[in-house]
Image: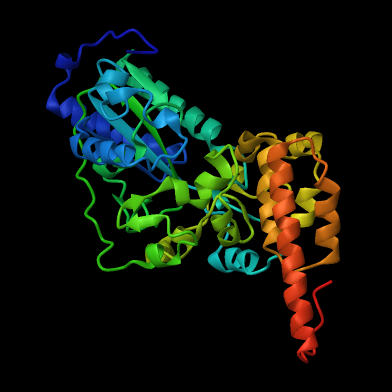
Amino acid sequence: MTQQSKTKPAADFSADDAEQLARVIKQWGEELGFQQIGIADCDLSLAEQRFKRWLDDGMHGEMGYMSRHGSKRTRPSELVPGTLRVISARMDYLPEHRRRMDHVLEDPAKAFVSRYALGRDYHKLLRQRLQRLAKRIESRIGAFGYRVFVDSAPVMEKPLAAKAGLGWIGKHTNVINSRAGSWFFLGEIYCDLPLPVDTPASDHCGRCKACIDICPTDAIVAPYVLDARLCISYLTIEHPGSIPEPLRPRLGNRIYGCDDCQIVCPWNSFATLTREADFLPRNGLDTAALLSLFAWEEDEFLRRTEGSAVRRIGHQRWLRNIAVALGNAPPSTRVRDALRRRASHPSALVGEHVRWALAMQMQGLGLAAGMSCEGSDEGHAD
């Protein structure tokens, strides 16, 4: 299965050995900067049923990779033969308090970037830490079978985290921990060790539907069911084509992902700020102006997003998303001039969204002029 050849058969582990090793693994995980380590078995039969229904309903949109691997996603031992347990880890990433996020969302001249993407790309950091954890295990027991994953393969990380006791899957489909909220990354070690499993967390969403009510695009179509085709995170990151016109005004100033369902979740009152310097904002993306980001040419985009998760969308989608946000901004000469400078962009995708944004700006200008004619003391926003 593995990155190492196995020297000690699973049968050689006594229950006491396994119990002691599990305790040590959790201790080492904390020393490596994880806020919690849990252990799960490989039975994802209930999650598999729900996942298949979600796929059958087409809610994955154009994320064809979600169905590409068959049952390997929902059956860990098929993805990595020999897997007996999954060591699931979480690491907090919240870089700032809610009031700072609210301030950006309420300012149409600012760009909102999902807070997980403000700092260094989490994939490398978590993978390195999990690899170090696996090496510590190996130093104690000898070589064993394992593979490390951080959102890098067909792995159902949320159901596995829930089974491992890291939290429950909330109505917005994110994992929620009763002591830490939901602002955390997940990673896994698939292994062939017969470790004792942890008790899954109970669901504590109750009657709350704050996440459902706040969703700008009504993407949470039912409790615990997210239609990715409507989700701003999907539309701005995963979706390669044109953003449906009826949804564009609902994006507001969100140019990369959306955190609304997490911001409003009552359990996030218990969230603590990250202790990882790598997750803190880079290049001013936490408070950046839309016009400044829209002016980035591709070389500057690549330079400023080096080592960031944002880079994966590429320059064209970056401009597409910002064009929509500028179309949603109050009418302004500066905004219209910036859009006109991009009107001749060679990408048809960018051009389409720039033209829409210009039309929205002109429409807003007309409305503002009409209000002025009716006696408003405020002129238009130029």
Q: Is residue 180 above or below residue 307?
A: below
Q: Is residue 286 visible?
A: no
Residue found at x 20% / y 11%: 9
x and y percentages locating residue 127 in the rendered image: 48, 29
x and y percentages locating residue 380 in the rendered image: 80, 77
Residue found at x 32% / y 58%: 178
* Total marks in image: 0
Image quadrant where one finds the N terminus: top left
x and y percentages locating residue 174 in the rendered image: 38, 50
Q: Is residue 83 left or right of residue 259?
A: left
Q: Is residue 339 above or below residue 332?
A: above
Q: Is residue 60 visible?
A: yes
Q: Is residue 43 above or below residue 288?
A: above
Q: Is residue 330 left or right of residue 198?
A: right
Query: What colour scheme governs how the chains and residues are painted in the rendered image of this protein?
Result: rainbow
Front residue of 150/375: it is 375
Q: Is residue 185 above or below residue 268?
A: above
Residue found at x 68% / y 40%: 349
x and y percentages locating residue 338 in the rendered image: 83, 54
Q: Is residue 81 left or right of residue 184?
A: left
Q: Residue furthest bottom?
A: 375
Image quadrant where one finds the C terminus: bottom right
Front residue of 189/357: it is 357
Residue found at x 77% / y 71%: 365
